Amino acid sequence: MMSFNYSDLIAVSPILFLSLYSLLILVVDASLRKPANSVYWLTLIGLVVTGFLTVNTYYASGTAFNGMVFTGKFPAFFEIIFLLSAVLSVLLSRSYLEKEELHYGEYYSLLIFATVGMMLMASGRDLMVLFLGLELMSISLYVLAGFVRRNAKSNEASLKYFLLGAFASGFLLYGIALVYGASGTTNLSTILARFQTIQGDPLLWIGAALILVGLSFKISAVPFHMWVPDVYEGSPTTVSAFMSTGSKAAAFAALVLVFNYSVHPSWQLQTVIAYLAAFTMVVGNLIALAQTNIKRMLAYSSIAHAGYALVGIAAANSLGRTGVLYYMLAYTFMQVGAFGVVSLLESKDERYLKISDYEGLSFRHPVIAGLMALFMFSLAGLPPFAGFFGKYYLFASAVTANMTWLAIVGVLASVVSAYFYLSVVVNMYFRDLPEGSVAVKVSKMGAFALIIAAAAVIELGLTPGQIVSFTEKLF
């Protein structure tokens, strides 16, 4: 019989508070005549308060609810990433939704529900908690993907994401069932304690492989990536920003917990993950070269970045784990910033969705163009920005794990990626402003979100050693 006490509630107070707060927002949304603006500010307040609670529970490292949930350091770090992604997305969302005439309060409720699901995934000490978090996150994102109800592409994105996501969830749940059959438990700590006696059971490794398949869908690893470009293109741009950062970070938190904490990968499983990483880096970057739509380019870019982070999972060493954590933090700011620029410039008639639409942007909007260039440089992995050091730590972990070939593939893939990232910069700075182009009114709150993201990209690039030293203390 499960029991809990007051200290358990304190330890999970960020998740508990945000869950209750999401219900409050639903009530406010249903009670007011024009609730959208009020719900917008309430959402920001709730996310900031949750952030303070997360910081206050950082040192409450341990478990709660009879060992079902991790508390403190590791989950707190990822919870901060999820909250940063949510706050930046909310700051960008108001002006975007008003342009699309879709500024409804339920948008923010769904975004908060998705954030709670992500927090549960990072806190899951039990595979069933992890699964519940994944489903809460996924269902919220299915609806958000189709939020532009009158747009056929948005409807297609929602349906495609739902159908393929449900299929992937089936793989994950069946994998959990097989792991339970081999170990007699779904608790990660108990699986770790029994690992020496059950590691010869093929059910364990089949179950682990199916869990890997389910989570690979969420991180958009090849060959489970086919949904990504259509979903990112059809979804509201601010949802694409949130989806490509928060949900990816949540899935990588789960991968670290399962494959670097409870199930020590055999060399065969490490090799599978390594090849998964290599194909993901190569395919993502090569197909991105052919894209003319900037949202599809960023979608394939997101696939490639999942491959970079998978290198740390394949390495299965301390440098790989810290590299994944650092990269997820840096990637959140880079990707939200890039999608944020698109959301601020995008118009209802779908202007600024083609890379060619960015020709001469530096003449019309020099600050926005400068911020976009910074995000492109960091995504390409150019020093001294955060993206460079993130890739460095991940590739170094592969070399340490005697996977030098994987690091070489990653470096070559990064070289290829420079072409399509820098093509955006070339269009902005080395192409003439097209005739008949008009200035776009940029939201102040949206520009503020971009400045925060840009400052974080620079700061993480200037002080990478401090962040890595901090992440080493999370395990």
Image (tube, rainbow, N blue to C red):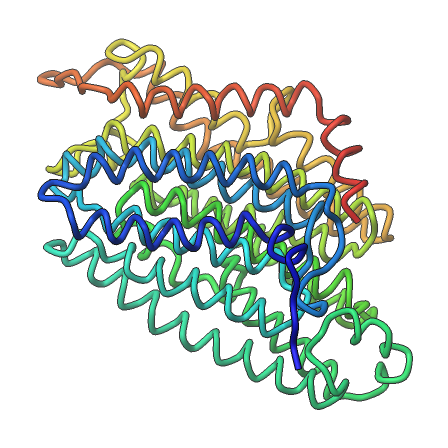
Q: Quadrant of residue 434?
A: top left
- Image coords of residue 42 (percent x, y): 32, 37
Q: Is residue 424 above or below residue 61?
A: above
In the image, taking residue 55 as reference, residue 189 lies left or right, namely right
User: Residue 73 or 360: which is nearer the viewer?
Assistant: 73
Q: From the image, which quarter does the N terminus lie in?
A: bottom right
Q: Residue at x 50, y 61 (%)?
A: 218
- Image coords of residue 20 (percent x, y): 41, 54
- Image coords of residue 207 (percent x, y): 66, 81
In the image, taking residue 42 as reference, residue 474 lies left or right, namely right
Q: Residue furthest right?
A: 196
In the image, taking residue 171 as reference, residue 432 lies left or right, namely left
Q: Residue furthest front?
A: 6
User: Residue 29 or 102: which is nearer the viewer?
Assistant: 29
User: Residue 9 or 391: which is nearer the viewer?
Assistant: 9
Q: Residue at x 25, y 22 (%)?
A: 443
Q: Quadrant of residue 366?
A: top left
In the image, taking residue 260 as reference, residue 391 lies left or right, namely left
Q: Is residue 111 above or below residue 142?
A: above
- Image coords of residue 342 (percent x, y): 30, 32
Q: Is residue 373 above or below residue 141?
A: above
Q: Residue at x 64, y 22 (%)?
A: 383
Q: How many numbered circles are shown?
A: 0
